[in-house]
Amino acid sequence: MAERARVAILISGRGSNMIALAEAADRADCPYEVVLVAANDPDASGLARARMMGIETWGMSHKGMNRAEFDALIDAELRRVRADYVALAGYMRLLSPEFVDRWAGRMVNIHPSLLPAYKGLDTHARAIAAGDVEAGCSVHVVTADLDDGPVIAQARVPIKPGDTPDSLAARILVEEHRLYPQALAEFVRDESRS
Ligand code: GRF
């Protein structure tokens, strides 16, 4: 089999999407492997989960450092593990323009809304407050503006009467875990053909 693409995943918290991506990579026909999980919080619970799965981790607090300085440290780690792609999975920190530039066309993110609707935070509450009848999640290529790059895949769920932000988030999260591994695999396959 051809060599698999080397993916590094950036997280800030529990990392359930990271786990979905890493579990999918266990399948022999998956075109990518996960070579590093990095976090801007050394106590992010996802780091421990990644280690339990046998994945190398890196965690450091960004506090006291400016954005470009911290991102340069992450970039050095990504180069060290020879990452081909970066997958953001609940990475709750804006990235510096230099970092975004360096990984242009090779970095994707998952966002819990049907982009271009509801960029930024509190997506579930905003969709409910607007009276929307459906919501969902989007995987997109990362560009300089927040949650703004080309969308490569989306999944939709209904918003049901009585939904709270938490109940809607839980319904969408199930779809995120299904969508993200598929979308990343397709992205990597497309890129390796181009
Ligand atoms: C997910 O809802 C993702 O779409 C958003 O942040 C959340 C991260 O959850 N960007 P997890 O850490 O992957 O469980």
Image (tube, rainbow, N blue to C red):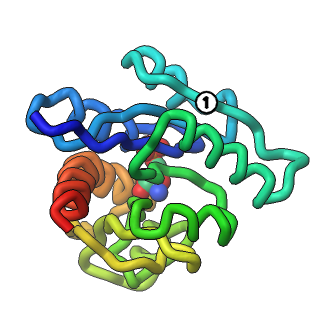
The answer to which of 54 and 189 lies nearer the viewer is 189
Q: Quadrant of the N terminus?
A: top left
Reading the image, the residue beneath label 1 is: 58
Q: Which sits in the foreground, 105 or 48?
A: 105
Residue 41 figure quarter: top right
87 relative to 107, above or below: above
Please state which of residues 171 and 2 is positioned toward the viewer in this rendering: 2
Viewer can see residue 161: no
Looking at the rendered structure, the kind of residue marked 1 is Trp
**Could you tell whether 167 is left or right of 177 in the image?**
right
Ligand 1: does it lie within 8 Å of the C-beta at label 1? Answer: no
Q: Is residue 12 left or right of residue 106?
A: right
Q: Quadrant of residue 138?
A: bottom left
Q: Residue furthest right?
A: 64
Asked where in the image residue 93 lies, by quadrant, the reply is bottom right
Left or right? Give the position of 55 relative to 193: right
Query: Total marks drawn?
Result: 1
* Above or below, 193 relative to 72: below
Q: Is residue 165 above or below residue 65?
A: below
Give x and y (percent) for residue 102: 56, 63
Estimate the x, y position of residue 194 in percent, counting from the top left: 20, 68
Residue 116 image position (x, y, % from top left): 39, 84
Q: Is residue 70 visible?
A: yes
Picture residue at 67% right of the left edge, 67% below the top: 98
Within 10 Å of disc 1 (Cα), the crowding (few <14, some 14-19, many 20+) is some
Q: Residue at x 84, y 45 (%)?
A: 63
Q: Position of residue 72 (x, y in %)?
A: 71, 51
Seen at 33% across and 65% down, the residue is 139
| Residue beneath the point at 21% across and 37% down | 3
Label 1 sits on a secondary structure element that is: strand
